Structures are given as structure tokens and as C-alpha cells.
Image (cartoon, rainbow, N blue to C red):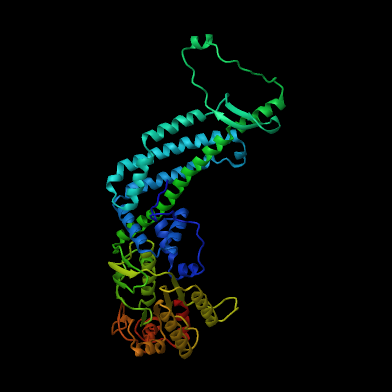
Amino acid sequence: MKAHLMYRDRDFDLGQEARPYEEALVADLELPTLFAAMSRGDTWLTEVVRKALLASSVEVDTILYRQDILKDCLRNEAAVREMYDLAVETIASVRKYYLGRLARYPGWVLHRSVEGMEMLVDMLRRLRGLADQHAAAFESEGFRALFAMLRGELGDDYFATVRHHLKQLKVHDRVFISAQLGEGTKGASYTLRREKAREGGWLTRIFATGPPAYSFQLPDRDEGGSRALSELRDRGINLVANALAQSTEHIVSFFNMLRTELAFYVGCLNLHGRLLVQGEPLCFPRPSVPAERRHSATGLYDVCLALKLGSRVIGNELQADDKDLVIVTGANQGGKSTFLRSIGLSQLMMQCGMFAPAQTFAANVCERIFTHYRREEDVAMKSGKFDEELSRMSSIIDGLVPNSLVLLNESFAATNEREGSEIARQVVTALIERHIKVVCVTHQYEFARRLYAEDVPGRLFLRAGRLPDGTRTFIVTQGQPLETSYGEDLYRQIFADDDGAHRSSGSLTTRGAASK
């Protein structure tokens, strides 16, 4: 039995190895905030949603397959949570039947496996009941296949047969075993047999004559004989005990995978409910193949910022179809980094089959997603800040494949304007030539100006909005790079007195330190 709620034809691999660039992606996009909202503090849910987001799919069909399943989950939230709770309850109950060191004794394996199987059969019966109750309300291919499998394989005949076999396997005092003589007249081919049903009434059985039988009785204090008899008994039931234990493991594996794959959708339900309360827009994105260049959105916002604030945030529009490079410039603290983060988060959410934080969203799937953000100085003084930036870029380049996405946030700003701009220009140009999509936030005017002056198709230049009085609109619009980032606005905001007069140089230090 297979759940197949993440892929049509295979299980979701929770144990796949993490890729080297994932930690930077988690930190730069502030993904722990998203994980926490999806898991609500549940450690297991956190593990699943983290893996699902970071191991996002590059197959458009798989993304659409998950979207349909998630739409079913949103329409039938109570039923999905009930199935998930049942899977969680089952896995918790299984732990009682863990054999540990006693697993080497066939008699104990058989006894505990029978008890465990009885519990699992009861859970399967409850799951089948949920399928019968809710199947008509689900429309997605994934859930229809799951319910059809449950109703086809877990019929009344199945449960009756299992109950019958479990009753036969409840070995008590009498065990019927057949054997053959092997080499050296040693016993071989020990096989557990069913006790033949007795015919007729008790009077008939008393006076009936049967074939001759040979028996012996162990003396009460014959410890060696008792040990030998126990070994014979274990040999007889060993194959049956192992077979039942394997059957039990098969059902446990199914419930484990059902719990894992439903956990992703439960996390999506948790996030959807929270954003819905905040009034944030959500949509199911339209993915396209990696080789295309599609990237458009309306009402696009940073979902992690919205979760932190607990209220609605300003959304942006993006029209970057047929673009390989997007450069964002403009006023300091104008929302450029937030806009960049919204692009990375929406891309990840789309590629794992989730809804997107926008009113509308469409983009091509990216083979891999990398971030290169500004970092603090190396506290161990093993290298300078600029050396560290170059080292991280080198690691990113080692992992790049065509049709990847690279998000650059004030990269190469640790050196002077001329050198930083030239390095950034050469790196970005090389990435585009290798069919890499690049979105870049920069304060380096020379870098942005030179690329803008080349007037090459496939490039989009955006600018963070600012009103004449210095107020930030946090709306990003199309526009050519400007020489200034309006740092004077921040100076006046931080260092001005209530009456608008600037502080003396002695007071500047105090006020500046307090504002950091």
C-alpha cells in the first residue's frame, strides 16, 4: 500500500541528504519564521515542511499534482486533519510493540506481532471508514487514488481473513509442528501446522479410534529436556513469526508514509488559516518549464514579514517575463531587500506545490535557488569581509546548473565602489551567459548604470519608491538607477531633534548608538 500524495509514482524521501547551499537559503530568506507558522511548534511537522520546501520539485506536473491535492485539503480540512491524527495515533501506538532485545525469541516475536497486527487492523478499519465517509468530497487525482486503494484492498473479506489467521496464530500451550529427518538424523524443515478441526460431538470423539500415536512426557525437573523442547517450538514458529513481523512492518511503513505526506498538507493548512485571518491574499501559481523565462505577479509580498508583524503588508507588482536579469535600486530602507525576499519565498512555495503569497503569481520553475546576501565581519578574523563574499560566491558557482535562480543582496559591497561594481558586473554577466536567472539588489550606482547603459533585451530595472518629502512607499516600480540612495533622509530621521534641528557632533554618537 502506498499513499502517493507528494508524487504520483513514488514516496516522499524525508531522509534525502541536504545540499550545501540550503543553510544560506534558510538564513537569507528567514525560513524559520515560515517553518514555525506551518508547524505550530510541532517538531515532526517542522522537519517535514523544511524538507518539502528545500527539496522543491522541478517538475511542473508534480507541482500541479500537489496543488490539486492541496485544494482538496482546503475544501475538506476536517477530514484531512482526522486522517493525519489517525496516522499519528497509529505510529504512537506501534511503539508499545517494539521488541528490542527480545526480538531474537520467535515465540515472543509471534506474540507481540499478533497483538500489534490486531491494533493495526483496527486502525486500517478506521481509515477505511474515513475513506467511505469522505471519498465523494475529494476531486484530486492523488486522493481519489488513495481512497480507491483503501476501498479496494481493505474490503470486508480482507478483515475477516486477517482476523481468522490471527486467531489461529495465538499459540498457547499446544503447538502443532511437522519436521523431517535431515543429515545425521537431525531434524529439518520445521513447519507450524494448524490443528485439525475435530468432527462430531464429544461422545463421538471419546470412543473414536484414530491412527496410532507416539508420545512422551518430560519429567518435572528435566531442565535440559524443557530447553530442547522450547528450541523445537521456536524452530517451528520461526518462519511464521518472521512473516507476521514483516507484514506488520509493511503496514507500519504505510502509516509512516501517510503521516509524513499528510504532514506537509497539514502545515499548508496551518499557514493558510493564519494568513487568512490576517487578510493576506493567496493564490495558486502558474508554473512553467525551466527553459522559459516567466516571472509575473500582482500583490506579491514577503510572507515572513507578514507573519512577524501579524498584519497586512504592502504588496508589489512584477512583470519580468522574458527577463534574465532584474536589478533593484533606490532609496535606503525602501523595501528592496523585502521585495527580493518575497521573490525567493514565492518561488520556493510554488515549487513545492503550495499557494503563493500574492494575488496572482506565474513563474518558470528553477532548477536550483541560491542566495548571496551581505554578511557580518568574520568574528574569528580568519578572513576579511570581501574575501568571505568571494568565497561564498565561489561555492555557489560550484553548485550552479542552467536555469537556476540566484538572488544577490548588496553583494561585493565590502570593497570600494569601482572594484565592487566591476566584479559584480563580470559575475552577473557570466551568470546570464550560463542561462542563470539573476535578481539583484544593489547600492552600487556604477554597476547598475553600466548595465542599464548597455540597453540589452532581457533586463529589467526597478526602483524602490520615495515621495518628495522622503517618505518610503515600499512599492517597487520600473525605473532607471539613480546616483543617490537618499541616505540624507535617514540622517534627518535618526539625528534630527523634535524641532527639526540637527544635534551637535557630541550628541550624534549617543543617538546613533541607541538606534542600532
> Is there any visible trace of residue 301 in the rendered image?
no
Q: Residue 436: give x, y in percent of width and height.
A: 41, 76
Is 495 left, or right, of 245 in this rendering? left
Q: Quadrant of the N terminus?
A: top left
Image label count: 0
Toward the front, the furthest residue is 183
In front here: 490 or 448? 448
| Vertical side of 425 occupied by 276: above or below | above
Q: Residue at the spot x=40%, y=58% of the render?
A: 38
Q: Is residue 503 above or below residue 356?
A: below
Q: Which residue is drawn at the image coordinates 50% and 28% (left, top)? A: 168
Quadrant in the picture for residue 370: bottom left
- Asked if residue 209 lies left or right of residue 268, the reply is right
**Residue 497 location in percent, x, y?**
38, 83
Residue 185 picture quarter: top right
Q: Is residue 2 left or right of residue 316?
A: right
For this rendering, which residue is in front, 64 or 447? 64
Answer with the quarter of the image where residue 99 lies: top right
The residue lying toward the viewer, choosing from 189 and 17, is: 189
Q: Residue 295: horizontal and vertical position, in percent?
A: 32, 73
Tell me: residue 150, above or below residue 197: below
Q: Position of residue 223 (x, y in %)?
A: 71, 26
Residue at 36 percent of width and 76 percent of height: 335
Nearest the eye: 412 or 53? 53
Q: Is residue 149 visible?
A: yes
